[in-house]
Amino acid sequence: MLEILVATVAAFVLGGAYYAIFASEGSEMRPWMVAVEVLRCLVLVAVVAGLASEAGVSDVAGGLALGTALFVGFPLVLWVGAVVHERTPIRTALLHGGDWLVKLLAIGVIVSVGL
């Protein structure tokens, strides 16, 4: 359970730092937005932790592999679809895709090593 809390905080902090570094425009986060973002991180962490547990992933390499596989299977595929079919700007897709990659790798490692 501790790894869930740690990974949730890590995902939230990493996301904030990522956008502070790479996003050209920042927007002020209202308290309700912070709560939504923490909840999103918690749901993501719970799903990754459940998959790691079921797959028996229990080391750094396995956590990185799980995070990479989840990134390729979901955010990458979805962002490519958004660029191709909805004409989402590539810069937007790269920005948000990078956030997902960083979070999924970190979460994969934290929950795998903590299990």
Image: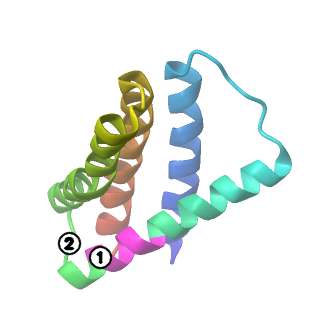
Tell me the amino acid under the disc marked 2.
Val
Question: Where in the figure is residue 113, as x and y percent of width and height?
Answer: 30, 65
Residue at 83%, 43% in the rendered image = 30
Q: Is residue 85 above or below residue 112?
A: above
Decide which of 87, 80 is in the foreground and name it: 87
Relative to 40, is 48 on the left or the right? left
Name the residue that disc number 2 marks: 57
Amino acid tagged 1: Leu
Residue that badge 1 annotates: 51
Whether the residues at callouts 2 and 1 have beta carbons within 8 Å, the answer is yes
Disc 2 element: loop
Disc 1 element: helix
| Observer able to see residue 3 | no
Please indicate whether residue 109 sits to the left or right of residue 10 in the image.
left
Q: Quadrant of residue 57?
A: bottom left
Mark in front: 2 vs 1: 1
